[in-house]
Image: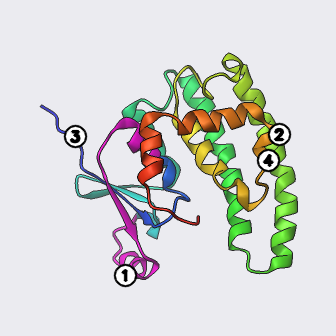
Amino acid sequence: MSTMPQYRLIYFNARARAETSRMIFAAAGVEYEDVRITKEQWRTEKSSGKYPFDQVPCLEIDGKFVLAQSRAIGRYLANEYGFAGRSNLEKAKIDMIIDVCEELYVGVRQIFFEKDETKKAEHKADFVVKADSILAALEKIHVANNGGSGFFVGNLPTWADFEFFVRMEYAPFFDVAILDRYPKLKALVERTSSIPQIAAWLKKRPKTEF
């Protein structure tokens, strides 16, 4: 008789690169330890040599550090718990959306951590143009799947929907109204947040700036 793995997801007290995996855990109803370390703790942890690539997030399974890299962790959990698509083509479409969402994250991160206000404004102006292009393409992809009345791929939520939701939480950093220009995507964000398990997670999760 198999037993449920014991998971520890290790990251900082931030959404950033770990939140999609947290949402998969929530949607799947799988218990895990949400380990949130401080920057000071990380200095000690990093020097321990036990983290692959000396980075977090890391997923520990049954007491062993098995996975680093946020998308590898998310893909593993999505495959384990039914949020990765039902065919190789669906999986590829999901990966496509995940990869372009990474571009959204990198752009927002550059804005968030820029200290020079002039450069920050320049980054925002440039990024809004890029984000508009990405969102326009994603809206077409979404509409092509059941008219945009459900989720990105297939008939059920996948980790692509969770990833997109997480990235759109950062919209206020560059354009608070950007989703108003993409009503199908805005409805997708609302639909994702209304999934009961996700809604419960959003209500109880720690409040963080980034």
Q: CA distance from mark 1 to mark 3?
A: 30 Å
Q: Nearer the viewer, mark 1 or mark 2?
A: 2
Tell me the element at label 2. Answer: helix
For label 1, the crowd category at 10 Å Cα-Cα, with few meaning under 14, some 14 to 19 and many 20 or more, is few
| Dot 2 and dot 3 residues touching (CB under 8 Å) | no
- The amino acid pointed to by label 2 is Arg
Residue pointed to by mark 1: 44
Q: Nearer the viewer, residue 96 or 207?
A: 207
Q: Residue furthest top?
A: 146
Q: Quadrant of the N terminus?
A: top left
Q: Nearer the viewer, mark 1 or mark 3?
A: 3
Going from N to C along the chain, the mark reached first, 1 or 3, is: 3
Which circle marks residue 4 in the picture? 3
Q: Nearer the viewer, residue 61 or 108?
A: 108
Splitting the image into 4 quarters, where does residue 125 fall? bottom right
Residue pointed to by mark 2: 181
For label 4, the crowd category at 10 Å Cα-Cα, with few meaning under 14, some 14 to 19 and many 20 or more, is some
